[in-house]
Amino acid sequence: MTQFDQSKYWVERHQRLPSDPRSVGNMGRSLEENQRSELLVREVVDRAARLLAAARTALDLGCGYGRVSRCFTDQGYRYLGVDVSPDAIQHAKEHNPAAEFQVGDLSKWTTDRRFDVVCVLYVFIHFVDDAEWLSLLERALSWVAPAGALLMADEFPKEREATRLHVVSRPLKAYDVILEVHGFQFDHAFREQLIGSGNEILPQARPFRLARRRD
């Protein structure tokens, strides 16, 4: 069986769907549904950025065309977005000149910099090879500043699921093991703050998790 080339897949997907939310969203849904989903993701990330008010720098892995970049730069963060697609990065630069963007294959990309927030939104799920998934997760944790956090969103089934060629969903327990090894744990109080309560509840925040270093 030919190994799935995820980098080629995403470069070509962005070429076919330039600046289109389906390029980073759900191809099984309509353009309108993807536009609505993108607005909801931005709403959650904007709230997360506000809750992490002490943070000043953000790294967005798999940033696509910079869809959440303004959630950070509009609140004064110094933001770096990285994506494998040159087309997506070109649009991101045009969309938000206040941000920094780089073309980079996340299976290989690295940096010596550390960030208050490392943001990984629906990216781990597309690392279908377990070794590449583990490598990215461990590198992402290494890019978190000492008092920083990893903000992530994905599907978290009870057991590992491979539903499509470019999708593998892993349970939270798989992440817990790696976080523990690297001195991190999920901040459940932050998640409750992010979701909110009463009229302020954001049900779309449920797939989001925040990992901090253990005291």
Image (cartoon, rainbow, N blue to C red):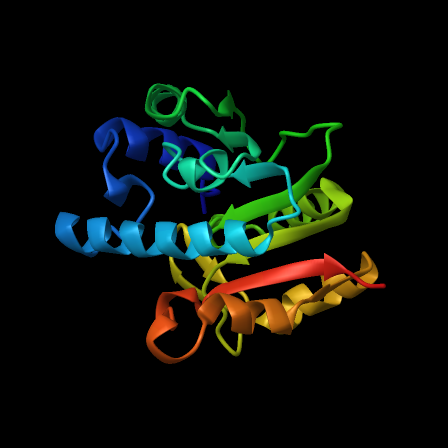
**Percent of width and height locating residue 48:** 51, 55
Q: Give the quarter of the image for residue 64.
A: top left
Quadrant for the C terminus in the image: bottom right
111 left or right of 124 in image: right
**Percent of width and height locating residue 72:** 49, 39
- Residue 159 vertical placement versus 167 (above, below): below
x 52%, y 79%: residue = 158
- Residue 111 vertical placement versus 167 (above, below): above
Nearer the observer, 137 or 208: 208
x 72%, y 59%: residue = 212
x 37%, y 29%: residue = 11
Q: Give the quarter of the image for residue 2.
A: top left
**Percent of width and height locating residue 54:** 66, 47
Asked whether residue 128 is in view, the answer is no
41 left or right of 116 in image: left
Asked whether residue 198 is in view, the answer is yes
x 26%, y 42%: residue = 21
**Percent of width and height locating residue 180:** 79, 65
- Residue 99 vertical placement versus 186 (above, below): above
175 left or right of 153 in image: right
